């Protein structure tokens, strides 16, 4: 058996492909500066689409929610004529609310459970709901509309359905995160304290467990408070509170590689902002509203500003740039390696879009508005199961897939980009075999586990040979 010190000799003498591959990788990185994006049509004729979503492990299906209370299904790239779910009799037509978000249970493949975040009522009687539905037991392309189970409800303080959030999400911990808006109009009501006070659920990030129930006597509260929530048994009115200081976190998403939540928080009269929240380290964090708007102190007399207790956004822009941030997703697909790790986001009202590169630690933002055209009120930049991204245009009723221009290489012509082909030695599952996988294999030398590529009980030169043959 070889020791790790001999690996360098193997790389050079056994197979020169890594050297070539590294050269090509460098060329690819340099050429990425010239890469641009474009979109291809996936679905048209939708009515006010709000979001696209996927279920874990299902590469064939993509779900689109429409504001009026209908969930459409795109299967194998084709929009199905029969809706996955129609509850338009439950959700009235509204300007600023309706069906706003959908999230699929991490174990959807086995339990068929998914969750809708929506409103009911009009004017002073608006209520927000988180409701569970299940997939049909006989047809996986249709949901059971009679399976509704209320998880959570909250009366809106707004008479028009303003600032209610809209992005229920399951985290890597299997818990459901629900960023809530302040429920106000321009400024935070109650003297600017609603988002700051632990007496309100509005303006917070909530975290709950939908797999059990702490409220068996209440048919409209069916969830469990995780023991790790920071205010359990403390001063908060509701132990579901996880963080605070939100204005209207309408579109939020988990970065599947880091486990962090990226939040597009709609601003007030001056600035829009992007916040990043790590559930492992950032519980109790205060993102500032209504003490600050972005990094700008407000006139709220109840706040000390500036204050080290307030967490600044990772990025902000003024209303000379955009007026209503949508938020977006971090790209973790395999078709565009040059784009991996970059955050794509948009502004609904000004019809603009950008990508943010944090490779240097400092946000570098590039305008991609013309590349994603036509843009008509983007309500979501969302993912499919493979991490590829889609743009949802609310006003013209379309879903378009984001791809690179020129198109990614497809050497064998099978319709799957070369970088998305299955790689036996892709140890870190990022779509290609490179120095990261080599590093992991070296770290696992002489041990078993994921680095034991030929499954003979230990990691050695045979596994290294497999990795080198699969390089690229």
Image: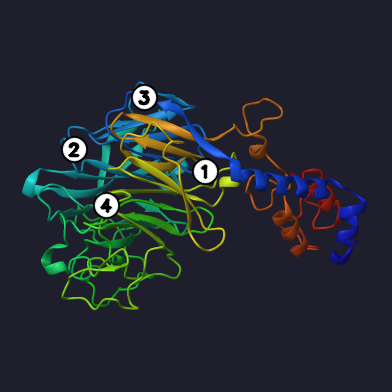
Quadrant housing residue 108: top left
Q: Which residue is mark 2?
A: 91
Nearer to us: label 2 or label 4: 4
The tag on residue 165 is 4
Mark 4–mark 1 distance (CA, rounded to whole Å): 23 Å
Mark found first going from the N terminus, 1 or 3? 3
Question: Residue at image x 17%, y 32%?
Answer: 89
Looking at the rendering, in which quadrant would you find the N terminus?
bottom right
**Secondary-structure class at tag 1:** loop
Q: Position of residue 18 (x, y in %)?
A: 81, 49
Quadrant housing residue 65: top left
Looking at the rendering, in which quadrant would you find the C terminus?
top right
| For residue 143, above or below residue 306 | above
Q: Which residue is mark 3?
A: 44
Mark 1–mark 2 distance (CA, rounded to whole Å): 30 Å
The residue sitting at the left extreme is 124
Q: Residues within 10 Å of mark 4 (few under 14, many from 20)?
A: many
Q: Residues within 10 Å of mark 1 (few under 14, many from 20)?
A: some
Question: Residue at image x 17%, y 62%?
Answer: 188
| For residue 211, above or below residue 89 | below
Left or right: residue 61 compared with residue 64: right
Q: Position of residue 177 (x, y in %)?
A: 35, 57
Instruction: Name the foreground residue: 468 vs 175.
Output: 468
| For residue 249, above or below residue 80 | below
Q: Are marks 1 and 3 in contact (CB under 8 Å)?
A: no
Mark 2–mark 4 distance (CA, rounded to whole Å): 16 Å
The tag on residue 387 is 1
Mark found first going from the N terminus, 2 or 4? 2
Mark found first going from the N terminus, 3 or 4? 3
Mark found first going from the N terminus, 4 or 1? 4
């Amino acid at each position: 058996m070889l020791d790790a010190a001999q690996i360098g000799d193997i790389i050079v003498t056994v197979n020169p492909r890594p050297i070539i591959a590294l050269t090509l990788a460098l060329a690819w990185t340099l050429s990425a500066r010239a890469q641009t994006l474009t979109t291809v049509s996936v679905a048209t004729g939708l009515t006010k689409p709000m979001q696209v979503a996927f279920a874990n492990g299902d590469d064939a299906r993509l779900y689109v929610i429409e504001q009026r209370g209908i969930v459409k299904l795109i299967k194998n790239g084709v929009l199905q004529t029969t809706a996955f779910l129609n509850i338009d009799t439950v959700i009235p037509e509204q300007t600023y609310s309706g069906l706003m978000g959908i999230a699929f249970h991490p174990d959807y493949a086995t339990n068929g459970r998914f969750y809708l975040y929506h409103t009911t009522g009009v004017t002073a009687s608006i209520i927000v709901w988180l409701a569970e539905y299940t997939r049909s037991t006989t047809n996986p392309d249709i949901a059971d509309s009679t399976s509704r189970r209320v998880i959570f409800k909250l009366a809106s303080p707004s008479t028009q359905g303003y600032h209610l959030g809209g992005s229920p999400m399951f985290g890597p911990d299997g818990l459901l995160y629900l960023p809530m808006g302040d429920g106000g109009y321009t400024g935070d009501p109650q003297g600017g304290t609603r988002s700051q006070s632990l007496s309100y659920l509005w303006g917070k990030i909530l975290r709950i467990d939908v797999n059990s129930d702490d409220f068996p006597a209440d048919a409209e509260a069916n969830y469990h408070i995780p023991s790790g929530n920071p205010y359990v048994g403390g001063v908060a009115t509701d132990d579901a509170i996880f963080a605070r200081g939100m204005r209207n976190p309408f579109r939020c998403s988990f970065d599947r590689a880091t486990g962090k939540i990226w939040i597009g928080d709609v601003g007030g009269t001056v600035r829009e902002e992007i916040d990043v929240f790590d559930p492992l380290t950032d519980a109790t964090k205060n993102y500032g509203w209504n003490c600050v708007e972005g990094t700008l102190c407000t006139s709220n007399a109840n706040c000390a500003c500036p204050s080290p207790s307030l967490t600044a956004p990772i990025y902000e822009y003024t209303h000379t740039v955009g007026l209503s941030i949508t938020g977006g997703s971090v790209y973790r697909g395999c078709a565009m390696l040059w784009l991996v790790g970059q955050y794509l986001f948009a502004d609904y009202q000004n019809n603009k879009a950008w990508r943010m590169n944090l490779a240097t630690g400092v946000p570098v933002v590039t305008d991609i508005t013309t590349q994603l055209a036509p843009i008509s009120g983007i309500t979501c930049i969302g993912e499919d199961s493979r991490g590829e991204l889609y743009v949802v245009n609310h006003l013209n009723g379309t879903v378009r897939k984001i791809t690179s221009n020129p198109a990614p290489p497809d050497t064998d012509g099978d319709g799957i980009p070369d970088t998305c082909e299955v790689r036996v030695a892709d140890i870190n599952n990022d779509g290609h075999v490179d120095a990261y996988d080599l590093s992991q294999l070296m770290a696992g030398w002489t041990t078993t586990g994921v680095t034991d590529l030929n499954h003979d009980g230990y990691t050695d030169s045979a596994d290294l040979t497999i990795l080198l043959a699969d390089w690229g």
